[in-house]
Amino acid sequence: MATILIVDDDEQFRNMLQQMLQRSGHHVETAVNGNQGIQVYRKTPTDLVIMDLLMPEKEGLESIVELKTEFNDIKVIAISGGGQKISAQPNLEIAKILGAIQTLHKPFSRQEILETVNQVLR
């Protein structure tokens, strides 16, 4: 199966997503923010990056731009639940413009993420 990098500052969500993808046969790397995610990807490029958009240190939109500039063929799924008083939808739309192949609004179902991952990896 594929190697997937999950970049999300929410430890509980990151661990849950990691377990879900591993149970589906994927190898999973993780990072807690955009800076760490970029470092991990530079060291060991993966087949897919699942990038949260709202994170401390380096948020997802900035990270997507940096990764797409350096690795044009990178595959990214952008995810976001928004934040306090902030809708996720505008950021998800911007992520697509910046190069994310797909976007998902948190919370999403196991079936939604697995179908999206399989679609992007095809």
Image (cartoon, rainbow, N blue to C red):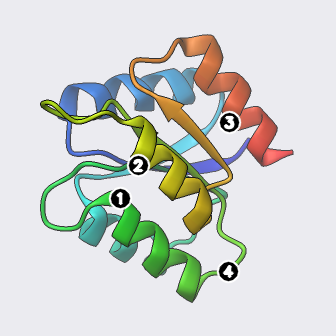
Residue at mark 4: 72
Q: Nearer the viewer, mark 2 or mark 3?
A: 2
Query: In terms of image quadrants, where is residue 71?
Result: bottom right
The amino acid marked with disc number 3 is Val
Decide: is 63 above or below 43: above
Q: Secondary structure at mark 3?
A: helix
Q: CA distance from mark 4 to mark 1?
A: 16 Å
Are the two marked residues, 2 and 4, in contact with CB atoms closer than 8 angstroms?
no
Q: Which quarter of the rendered picture does the C terminus lie within?
A: top right
Do the residues under discs 2 and 1 have CB atoms within 8 angstroms? yes
Left or right of 109: which side holds 115? right
Q: Earlier in the sequence, mark 4 or mark 3?
A: 4
Q: Nearer the viewer, residue 34 or 99?
A: 99
Q: Residue at x 36, y 36 (%)?
A: 88
- The CA span between labels 4 and 3 is 19 Å
Label 3 neighbourhood size at 10 Å, few (<14), some (14-19), many (20+)?
A: many
Question: Looking at the image, is 111 positioned above or below residue 95?
Answer: above
| N-term-proximal mark, 2 vs 3 | 2
Question: Mark 2 to mark 4: distance in Å?
Answer: 21 Å
Q: Secondary structure at mark 1?
A: helix
Q: Amino acid at mark 2?
A: Asn
Using the image as rendered, state which of residue 1 and residue 103 is in the foreground.
103
Residue 26 horizontal/vertical position (percent): 62, 37
* Rendered residue at 35%/64% (across/down): 37
Is tag 4's residue or tag 1's residue first in the polypeptide sequence?
Answer: 1
Query: Please, what is the three-letter code of the amino acid marked with disc 4?
Result: Asn
Residue wearing tag 1: 60
Which residue: 53% across, 32% down?
Answer: 104
Checking the image for residue 91, the label placed there is: 2
> What residue would you read off at disc 3?
117
Q: Mark 4 falls on what kind of element?
A: loop
